[in-house]
Amino acid sequence: ELQKLLVKRSVKKVAEARAEIILCVEHDQLAHMCDHDPKLIWEMLAQVHRACGLGTRMALRWKLLMATKGMMEAMSAWI
């Protein structure tokens, strides 16, 4: 019985999470909501909206190259 209760609760939480995501997105993004697993939906949205062009990669590389450790910051914290 405990196992059935946990499965029911799990199914309910997954459905609630999916519903919450669906309610928060705009109408144009509903095409990405075809899966029942909210984790997969979230990953799909992240992949679609993640910037991945040349400018983004160059900006990230520049940020890495120009990173400096603060005077009061420990080396282990900075790394």
Image: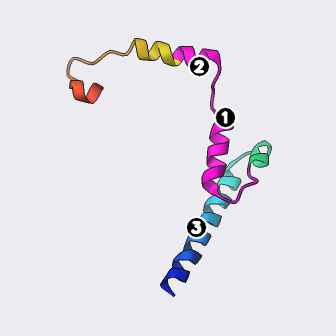
At 52% from the left and 77% from the top, the residue drawn is 6
Looking at the rendering, in which quadrant would you find the C terminus? top left
Q: Which residue carries the number 1 mark?
A: 49
Label whose residue precedes the other's in the sequence (2 or 3): 3
Disc 2/disc 3 C-alpha distance (Å): 36 Å
Disc 2 residue type (three-letter): Thr
Question: Quick check: is 41 in the magenta stretch?
Answer: yes
Percent of width and height locating residue 11 = 61, 70
Main structural element of the magenta stretch: helix, strand or loop? Answer: helix
Percent of width and height locating residue 63 = 45, 16
At 65% from the left and 20% from the top, the residue drawn is 53
At 20% from the left and 22% from the top, the residue drawn is 72
- The secondary structure type at the circle numbered 2 is helix
* Residue 7 to residue 20: above or below: below
Q: Which residue carries the number 2 mark?
A: 56
- The secondary structure type at the circle numbered 3 is helix
Percent of width and height locating residue 45 = 67, 42
* Residue 52 to residue 34: above or below: above
Disc 2/disc 1 C-alpha distance (Å): 13 Å
Which of the colour schemes (rainbow, by chain, secondary structure, one colour) is used?
Answer: rainbow
Percent of width and height locating residue 21 = 65, 53
Q: Is residue 67 left or right of residue 76?
A: right
Disc 1/disc 3 C-alpha distance (Å): 25 Å
Q: Which residue carries the number 3 mark?
A: 13
Label whose residue precedes the other's in the sequence (2 or 1): 1
- The secondary structure type at the circle numbered 1 is helix
At 76% from the left and 54% from the top, the residue drawn is 34
- Label 2 CA crowd tier, 10 Å (few <14, some 14–19, many 20+): few
Circle on res. 27: none
**In this picture, which residue range is highlighted in magenta?**
33-59
